[in-house]
Image: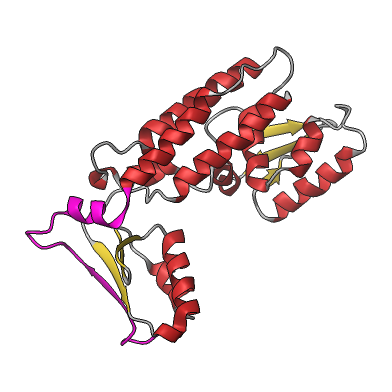
Amino acid sequence: MFFLFLLNIATEIFLHHLLWMGCDLMRPNWCILNPTSGAGRHLATLDRRLAELERRQLIERRPTTDTRRVQRLTARGWEAAWGGQDPAARWARPWDGRWRLLVFDLPTLASGLRTRLRRLLLARRFGRLQQSVWLTPDPVPEFQARLHPLPANVGSLLLFEGQTGASEPDAALVCRAWDFSALNKRYAAHERWLKRCPAPARGDGGRSPALLGWTVQEFHAWRTALRGDPLLPRALQPPGYLGEKAWAARRTVYQRLAAALR
């Protein structure tokens, strides 16, 4: 059951499960998968999956003198295991006090182009002030490089950088650009999944169907909340924001779970 689970789940959940159930906590770690563990015919398929993860630089091999196969989550793999971002690093980053504002005016016939641009802005965690006015507190050199192939000109797409006026506090921009009420509801929904964590049976190594199923559901709930979170520096976080509280609760639950499994 355990190996079938590993073979069929999505890559991010695969890495997430290895991080918490098979590794030491909170950092990229060595994860041992023993070929003598009775996985039988599924080991060859697992080998191919591990090779693919290594090709994508999500894991790397560690030389060993015995018969064990030892893999390490890379920093990139560790980030994927956390849900695609390291939120603690994002919250702790400094802010230079400057906003980057993207303004575009694309013709009605360019609906496909507008859709591509908005998806790119959401993926980059921009906030939306108006339909065609978006902003971020972060420098965007790599984002500008991604904009370059878009067929836009100075009359249809502009990127500004600056500070708010005296009558426009940064907090007002934050609350206008991102819906923190909806975001907090998603974090509250994730908290409910955390509270449903089943107690692991002694000696099952995290392989029980109930625990495996909960792992997948909790991961999806976390990804749903994280996807809509701008992960703003602490200087810009509005009162009542639940992101850091949710992150701490998640770490605590998985720490206790991993300790029980060990």
Where does residue 14 sit, x and y in percent of width and height?
Answer: 68, 41
Q: Which residues are magenta?
A: 152-179
| Quadrant of res 199 | top right
Find the residue positioned furthest to the left. Answer: 166
Quarter of the image with the C terminus in it: top right
Where does residue 239 sit, x and y in percent of width and height?
Answer: 23, 38
In the rendered image, the vertical position of residue 199 relative to residue 134, given as above or below: above
Residue 133 inside the magenta-drawn segment: no
Image side of residue 261 versus residue 139, left or right: right
Residue 159 inside the magenta-drawn segment: yes
Q: Identify the residue at image location x=47%, y=72%.
A: 115
Do we see residue 29 in this rendering?
A: no
Image side of residue 252 versus residue 236, left or right: right
Where does residue 206 sit, x and y in percent of width and height?
Answer: 69, 24
Do we see residue 116 in this rendering?
A: yes
In the rendered image, the vertical position of residue 123 relative to residue 183, given as above or below: below
Where does residue 122 sit, x and y in percent of width and height?
Answer: 43, 61
Q: Identify the residue at image location x=74%, y=36%.
A: 70
Find the residue positioned furthest to the right. Answer: 41
Along the viewing direction, whichever of 68 and 202 lies nearer the viewer: 202
Image side of residue 72 versus residue 87, left or right: right
